[in-house]
Amino acid sequence: MSGGVADRSLAPAPGPLRPFRFPPIERFELSNGIPVFFTPTSGFPIATFSVVLPSGAIREDASRAGLATLTGNLLESGTDRLSAPAIAEELETLGVRLGVGASWEVTSVEFTALSARVGDAAGIAAHLMTSATFPEVEVERLRSEQLAGILQRQADPRGLANEMASRYIFAPESAFGRPVSGTTGTVSGLTRADVVEYHQSTYTPHGAAVIVAGNLSSDSVQAAAESAFGQWQGPPPPDRSALVKARSSTVQVVIIDRPGAVQSEVRVGHLGVERNTPDFFAVLVMNTVLGGSFSSRLNMNLREKHGFTYGVSSTFVMRRQPGPFLVSTAVQTEVTGAAVREISGELESIRQERVAAADLADARNYLAGTFPLRLQTTGGVASRLAELFIYDLPRSYLDEFAERVLAVTDQEVLEAARKRILPERLMVLVVGDAKSVRPQLDELNLGPIEIVPAERGS
Amino acid sequence: MKFPIERHQLDNGLKVVLSIDSTQPVIAVNLWYNVGSRNEPVGLTGFAHLFEHMMFQGSANVPDTQHIAHIERAGGSMNGSTWLDRTNYYETLPSNRLELALWLESDRMGFFLPALTQEKLDNQRDVVKNERRWRVDNQPYGDWDERIQAMVYPPDHPYHHSVIGSMEDLDAANLDDVRRFFSTYYTPNNAVLTVCGDFDRGEALALVERYFGEIPRGPEPPALPGQPIVPTSLEAAVRETVESEVALPRVYIAFRVPPYGTDGFYQSDVATQLLTTGKSSRLYSSLVRERRLAQSVAGYSFPIVTGAAMGVFWATASPGVGVEAMEAAFWDEVNLLRTGACTQRELERVITGTESRQTISLQKVSERANEISMFTTLFDEPDRINTELDRIRAVTCSDVTRFAEESFGRESAAVLTYMPRARAVAS
């Protein structure tokens, strides 16, 4: 095709689509039985190397909340051979930043490096994971840092809203109800002995996996992983399930008061579903229609139609056990009640009527089409491999993702909405100016309103 | 890593840069308009950004909000952003949808005005005001860049005011302003279009010509308002203290530095990284680890080109630490650097770290396309994406010491301190 002026009145049709297949995944085992999952990539001379441990913060006693985070942060604080400054120099000489993720159900230690440096960086990571000594002065320093982080979170309306939303969705005895990095009360009591014990029981090869995505040969991946982790020994980790329970089975309305706030941070939601929920794809598509894209109902309503907000989204946080379902937004103080009314309206309406064919197709196409975009990076590929491992998903999940999404029907979406969105159990939480917000929420007649002064944190 | 670069220019002045990469079936389309907050006259702060929002509200052949809807239903993502020197619009899509992206971008470049309405302006004004509340007014330290820019640049300099603008000026914006702004700055001769990813060269060029070729060249953009020329060093130190809803004191220390693209700018970048990047950096080692005065430290050299750029450092005090003690420790370290201590090993770590981060970032076609648009707009050199690292590598220890001595002195610093509001003690 050449020349001529375009006919602009119609959107251009697609060209022929290059079919997408997830790249090959190789699997081998180290001498001590640790599985290695490797996807070779081409183009850039880099690789992402990740060690995933099947144990996380849900194992903490409630009184030691934040221990997993503290221990993870302390991995670089010193070993029998290297001081903290020496560790920093070694990693930074390789151009590597180590990412230690202490999340609820898994702990991960990861880095991305130029291919030629992966072997050395893996060696350092292994050394830190096996031989960290947790010097008292660093324990104290990082504990203070974690406490200061908690103070800062509580002074930040967004962070505070996220923290409080979990607290009100989950029962007090549920780990998911507390912040992963703990509270002022729990973190100030953490000791070096706690850290040592947590490290010994969590940083163990049992049930662990090494995940690599990058521009390397299979041989060099095997060699690097074996050299770094092949001799690693340790005890089996303790049991990893935990109680997950909702705080309430009726509507809760809470205002965390910040007098004079020009905006309300709003969180609306309740207990959600686990990753292995049988209606996973239907929930995904349903959530996309509701609040999972710019064109979603919530965003078109609150932002484009009403101008209440810069943005609004909904999400089902799917862990091995159910995380929250949450709608999140920040709206001008004066329209808080109106915004909550619109949110409730959208939650009702997706439960009442089937999604129209065109809107359903849009949501499915968005999910299916954007799936490969994250695979441009070694980090993105490694995340997908980790997902298979953490949630015991079949290899075919990655190849069939688009097909499964495109096959979701309007009936399935309706059923997912009716089953997974429960207006009678809604938690409505606002971090904002109670003086202005309270009367607005009163008008909605949702139920009794609890007002909490922002000062009273944890 | 070398990325292929091929450049063209249409008769109407539109610069077009192509960079092929068929590794993945994805494509990035990126458009830089050479207009930003620096072009806003007095009374119209925040306008370039508000205008950017308007560009998503439809054009002659694309209904309101459908720009993004088209891209999302095609399996892609789309956004835009406004900054001091420029406004960019970008989308990433499966590679068989290149024509869709070019249709959307050309329709709003050439045929935006017919779709403009007062209602859309009023709606997006509300959205932008909420964006300001969310980013600035309801965030701890949220107005730091607004305050720092006003301290570092004189009132008549185009960088004196913030990109987000003031509520008053946003309220004052009207439809005539929008029409005028569009006709003045949203022209093919004021824009760079980059396509990066999986495409056929001939097909792409034909499509670009078909969709953008008929858009007429616009007027030459006017000169920048005010006085863009300033010395690349503040003439006198300036200080400000703000009490606000923050948990811990924080200090921002800013300097004027040579504009992005100059040797001096890269020296600023390297010196800043040496001081702040990573746990082996000077300021982390001293302020955070050894002396435990700060929770965290960071630094950044703003890659901006109008008169002078800005190098900014910030440090958050640990609980119980006096902010004066932390600031004094900052100057101790900076002065050590100024008087000569810079080692080759540190320099190498800066270079290695920069190389790693850049390589990781450029894996994404959207990042590459944006960098290419930037280098073309600011320097008319798209190939700079392949040589930028060399400029970092060229910086020596004596460059760093000399630069820090000349530019990172207390006497030419703007220092902004945030203090927590004194509270009544809770029972």
Image (tube, rainbow, N blue to C red):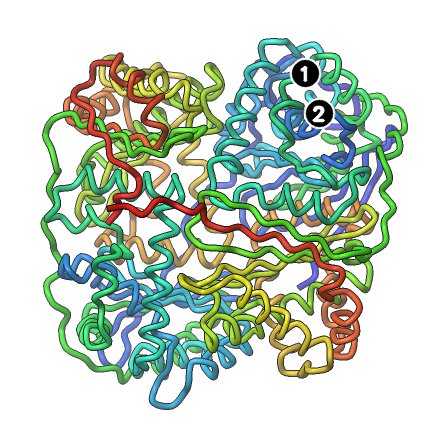
Instruction: Give the residue at x 57% y 20%.
Output: B124
Q: Can you identify the residue that label 1 sits on?
A: A8
Element under disc 1 = loop
Q: Can you identify the residue that label 2 sits on?
A: B106
Q: How far across and how far down the image is residue A447, in percent?
A: 17, 19
Amino acid, disc 1: Arg
Instruction: Give the residue at x 40% y 34%.
Output: A367
* Residue density around tag 1, few if under 14, some if 14–19, many if 20 or more, within 10 Å: some
Inter-mark Cα distance, 2 to 1: 9 Å
Protein chain holding label 2: B
Q: Quadrant of residue A108?
A: bottom left
On the picture, is A54 further left or further right than B383?
left
Q: How far across and how far down the image is residue A91, in percent?
A: 49, 76
**Tag 2 near tag 1, CB within 8 Å:** yes
On the picture, is A388 further left or further right than B100?
left
On the picture, is A447 further left or further right than A227?
left
| Image quadrant in which the N terminus of chain B is located | bottom right
